Image (cartoon, rainbow, N blue to C red):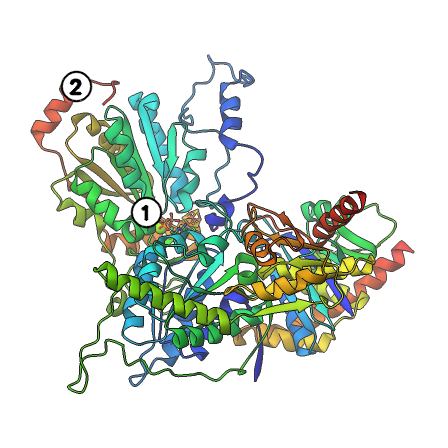
Amino acid sequence: MSAEELTLIEKTDKNISEEADALTNSDAAVNICDADEYSVVYERPHTLLDVNMHYCPGCAHSLVHKLIMEAVEELGIQEDTIGVAPVGCAVFAYDYMNVDMQEAAHGRATAVATGIKRLLPDKYVFTYQGDGDLAAIGIAETIHTINRGENILIVFINNAVYGMTSGQMAPTTLAGMKTTTSPFGRDTSVYGYPIKVSELISQLPGSFYVTRQAVNKNTAVRKTKKAILNALNYQKLNKGTCFVEIIGNCPSNWKMTPLESNDFIDEHMVKTFPLGDVKLPGAEDLKQLNQTGDKQPC
Amino acid sequence: METKLMKGNEALAEAAIQAGCDAYFGYPITPQSEVLEYLAREIPKYSTKEHIRVVLQAESEIASINMVYGAAGAGFRVMTSSSSPGISLMQEGISYIAGAELPCLIVNVNRAGPGLGTIQPGQGDYFQATKGGGHGDYKLIVLAPSSVQEMADFVFLGFDLADKYRNPVMILSDGAIGQMMEKVTFGKYNVHKTEKPWATTGKPESRGRNYITSLHIQPEKLEVHNLKLIEKYKEIEKNEVRYEEIMTEDAEYIFVAYGLSARICHKAAIIAREKGIKAGMFRPVTLFPFPSKRLNELAETAKLFLTAELNSGQMVEDVRLAVNGKVNVEFYGRLGGMVPNPEEIVNKLENLISKENVS
Amino acid sequence: MLEEIIIAGFGGQGVLSMGMTLSYAGMLEDKEISWMPSYGPEMRGGTANCITIISDSKISSPIISEFDTAIILNQPSMDKFESRIKEGGLLIYESTNIREISKRKDIEIIGIPAAQEALNMKNGRILNMIMLGAFLEKRPVVKIESIIEALKKVLPERYHNTLPLNREALERGASLTEIASGVLS
Ligand SMILES: Cc1ncc(C[n+]2csc(CCOP(=O)(O)OP(=O)(O)O)c2C)c(N)n1
Ligand code: SF4
Ligand SMILES: [Mg+2]
């Protein structure tokens, strides 16, 4: 479902996040099970607001939101985290993530994040961006932010299309892939090849940790979670930009079921965008990290 | 002649093909992405070795407008389209294009702002479109379609005016006109080809070199250039004013509106007439040049003007300047992508009339 | 003739295409038409509606707040639009999905079990054509033949084998109005 639409939706009167705040803070929750008999095996992180998300069923965005917020919760940095939302389907990330957030203009999230981080160097700052936002209109900001080695985390959701505006071609659209603006398939003689952003920016000395992950199966989800956790934690070191690319899906615009879209990632996306770490911190850096300890402003 | 049922955005795109548009550069944005999508599908069918026709999705609106600059400077019929946030990004390029006097067509399918705003229709970009928009002293010719047919017609007209005056032309539409479907007839226009001896096509022995620039570093020279532009704008004001009048002959109360608002005011005028109020509607078709003279004439006989816009009151300033105090000019606006219905506007008029009678 | 129609329901029920087909048929009969979709959010998953106007003379506003006819396919749309039908107007609703029906006495109200009927005809997608058939029976603003011609233009070639089924659906809808009206009277 196209979210530019969904998004701008029905939320005219109520401020959803305020409403959700009220809900999470209320004591109204009834304890229906006896703690002795049952134990909680799984919970929504408290850093994620308890509201319905506007994402299409099976879309990676919602899952990645949860992973970031889990990481924030586990690191105990909710009060010290500031996020920047993009223009893309995740434009309403600020309605879901229970941390301070700013909504940037299309493509400008890393510039906005620079502004925040330079003035609040002790805070954990992250951007959350799609491929159109980060690699098309915002590629200049992306490169220059990383080249300056801004000490922030960039979470990059690569779903190979413009989800929000209904499935146009993105800089990461696979060669030959059909979209609404490449109706005959992406012609590389006209549009070049999909940009491998992780490999590209790993060349910049300003990048500190660069990895490409996916969330189309359980093992992948766990790895992604770990990557986000590490990347946030590395901000303490002040060594440069951390970049976590996540191969997402867009079942609605890929015109697939969520399951088919997960398979499509394994069968096609990872051929162009191989998963794994692209650039890792050195052993010295990690040693330093262990000395800084947990739960402190970075 | 061929009649089709099309969305405004599609009609505009089809007209671009038929008007001999050589190149389209654009970036997706709701509510006008259909233009790029339509052309991505259709233009390749028309491109031949002899006549290369290009459709290219740019990486941003900044790139789009500068691609337009390049192709227009090389002498081709080129256009771009976007919606409000994207048009804001283009402002720098538009200023350069106006400065370098390059003919091209820029389409703004206006959505409500400021900022990301919403994707629903708006007319908040009136000032931006008619008063320059970017930096420096310049004007665009601004055409405001209020039907799907005009979305198509104004492409032909726009390209011709651009070529005639070596000036960028903007079609200022809105989300509703872009998304709605109506009948549209093609084949009414001939395609005019204008010689562009100033274009950078490669220098033959026979002429000196051509260059395209908006830079005139010596103030004396820039002032001469500025004055030349102003002369051109005056010429445009003399020749190109366009407007439509509905039931204005005997009207005591005149709605002034453009684009979608004009459609709504047309209906409002009909409803008002049914209620025995002598209402009419005046629709500026060109927003620059603005039909000030005609409005001033109408102000002689009318009792009240009511300007209706999807903004907080922009064109109304031009209406007031035009009538120069001769008649009371009131305003009714809806914001945020909300669209008034005709009854609302009639109510506003009735309220104003009753106040008038009291005082 | 001027018929101002709102068609509303869930995305996926064929709301927009019903209005589009009707508009197309109007065009084929040389009438003036306008089709204004609710674009954006509501188009997918949520509610969708379109205002379709068919007229013998030039159409002024494509956006109106009161309608001659409302063709309603879900409950939220019933709640939203029933009060906006003009006095003496027509309300046609899909009666297998909609439980709470307008209580107005100044309009004609007809329930068509189009979803059920579409199932009977083993094709859920022709629900909208059944509704359209019912509407045209009550307000013959265009001919059924024009709708079929319109479908030929609107549908891609590969679906042209469904034209007989569409015709059947239109006719079924028409005949259901008699049953529905009969029950009412
Ligand atoms: C200046 C500007 N241009 C265009 C748009 C329209 N727009 C909104 S989101 C988007 C692309 C989103 O794609 P992506 O970044 O890949 O995010 P996704 O929705 O796929 O997650 C575009 C072009 C805009 N809002 N602003
Ligand atoms: S599936 Fe695609 S369109 Fe839907 S929310 Fe996800 S990215 Fe956006
Ligand atoms: Mg994307």
Callout 1: SS: loop
Looking at the rendered structure, the kind of residue marked 2 is: Thr
The percent coordinates of residue B156 (x first, y second) are 47, 76
How many marks the image carries: the answer is: 2
Residue C122 occupies quadrant? bottom right
Residue under label 2, please give it: A292
Query: Which quadrant is the C terminus of chain B positioned in?
Result: top right
User: Measured along the vertical axis of the image, is residue B221 above or below residue B184?
Assistant: above
Residue B292 x, y percent position in the rendering: 57, 63
Chain on which label 2 sits: A
Rendered view: A186 above or below A133: below
Q: Residue A107 got which mark?
A: 1
CA distance for labels 1 and 2: 34 Å
Query: Which one is nearer the viewer's eye here, B255 or B69?
Result: B255
User: In the drawing, does residue A260 fall left or right of residue B31?
Assistant: left
Q: Depth check: give the residue in front, C105 or B219.
A: B219
**Disc marking residue A134:** none
- Left or right, B118 with respect to B36, comes to right
Q: Position of residue B324 (x, y in %)?
A: 60, 55
Outermost residue, top side: A36
> Given the image, what chain letter belongs to the residue carrying mark 1?
A
B330 with respect to B162 (left or right): right
Circle 1 residues within 10 Å: few <14, some 14–19, many ≥20:
many
